[in-house]
Amino acid sequence: MSFRAETMPDALAQARDQMGPDALVLTTRKVFDGPAWQVWRNPVFEVLVMPAASAAAQAAEQPLAAKLAEDLAAVRTALGRVASQFEPAQAHWPDPLAALHQQLLAQEVDADLALEICTAAKETLSARALQDCAAVHAFAARHMLARVRTTAPVLRERRPQVVVLVGLTGSGKTTAAAKLAAHAQLVLGRKAAMISLDTFGIGAIAKTRTLSELMGLPHALAYSADELAHAVRSQTSADFLVVDTPARNPRAAGQMAELAELLSPLPAERIVLLVASAATKTSDQLLAMQAFSALGVAGIVSTHLDETAVHGGIYSLACRTDSALTYFSSGPNVPLHWEPASGAQLAELVLGAAPASSGLRIA
Ligand SMILES: Nc1nc2c(ncn2[C@@H]2O[C@H](COP(=O)(O)OP(=O)(O)OP(=O)(O)O)[C@@H](O)[C@H]2O)c(=O)[nH]1
Ligand SMILES: [Mg+2]
């Protein structure tokens, strides 16, 4: 007969109560309770017991059977020891840490990065803090904040700058170009202008024209590298040029080289930002970053934050590519919903609001 309890002494006590003090314990082991599909099952202890009388009788009458039972018990114990070496570390995590792990995975934080955050919490926080949802949440937020770089390099300097926005089709490049130029002009007092190489799609030209006129920004169109060189030269009064690029498919051979060629007249110190929609799969974002990195991507503009409830991909992209997050866009309207990227905001989007604090101070 087997008995299960949360601790080994409890399981043995149950066995002793029901089977008598002389019952023969065949084996003890730690098992995980709950349905097999449930990843975070609680460990319980199980003892397998044979009644004293039957054990003695069997031992007397069937020495072979008793020997087999003994061998079986030994094999079970050995197997249990081997199995415990392969148990995932998460099996022993306290509930708040397991909940954090689930939250990170539900937010599509890369599995390795989710494990990194939880392992750091496990190794850093005291046993008491690990039982406290608020302390675990605060640790995770701090870890994410330290791990992800956020910077708006284009805002820091006063010298003339050229910022180029690249990215997958429909990622929000044209909208971001207008928002960035408007932000530079209206908030930072720069003299901004837009140059658009996005001349292919239906309505692309009209869109750039409408947005720049709406914001009162000078703008120019360029269909070729030569025209881009001319447009840059002609924007003499602007000290902040935002260059919008046409959609380029990183999977299509030659398109990246074409784009590099198109941008070749720009000064070497141009700042290339990858515009990445939060609603696009992380694997596709990583592919895009890999392809566009040939242009020297300096940072990421995260767009469409308002169109998804899952934001772990932004964190994963920034960490995986060791890139700085520069701006967040969370709406289609220019110049609204545009702000310098914030690690704290990203952590809140991924982790949810902080639970009520227990007052426990974390290390
Ligand atoms: N909800 C929401 N919509 C956005 C955001 N940014 C852009 N959009 C919308 O997304 C659509 C595509 O935006 P564009 O700026 O044209 O994207 P693009 O990357 O220039 O597109 P292509 O030039 O065709 O590659 C438009 O309908 C925008 O209004 C955002 O942050 N949130
Ligand atoms: Mg566009």
Image: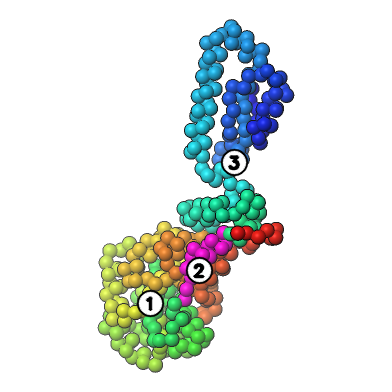
Looking at the image, is mark 3 or mark 2 earlier in the sequence?
3
Q: Residue furthest bottom?
A: 237
Q: Is residue 132 visible?
A: yes
Q: Position of residue 199 (x, y in %)?
A: 35, 78
Quadrant of the snapshot with the N terminus: top right
Asked if labels 1 and 2 touch by Cβ distance under 8 angstroms, the answer is: no
Say which amino acid is labelled 2: His
Q: Residue at x 34, y 79 (%)?
A: 269
Relative to 122, is 34 above or below? above
Q: Residue at x 42, y 64 (%)?
A: 322
Magenta segment range?
A: 140-152
Q: Secondary structure at mark 1?
A: strand
Q: Is residue 247 magenta?
A: no
Q: Secondary structure at mark 2?
A: loop
Residue 271: numbered disc:
1
Q: Residue furthest top?
A: 61
Crowd class of label 3 (few under 14; some 14 to 19; many from 20; radius 10 Å): some
Q: Residue at x 27, y 66 (%)?
A: 254
Q: Secondary structure at mark 3?
A: loop
Q: Position of residue 36 (x, y in %)?
A: 56, 37
Q: Which residue is mark 2?
A: 304
Q: Which residue is mark 3?
A: 41
Q: CA distance from mark 2 to mark 1?
A: 22 Å
Say which amino acid is labelled 1: Ile
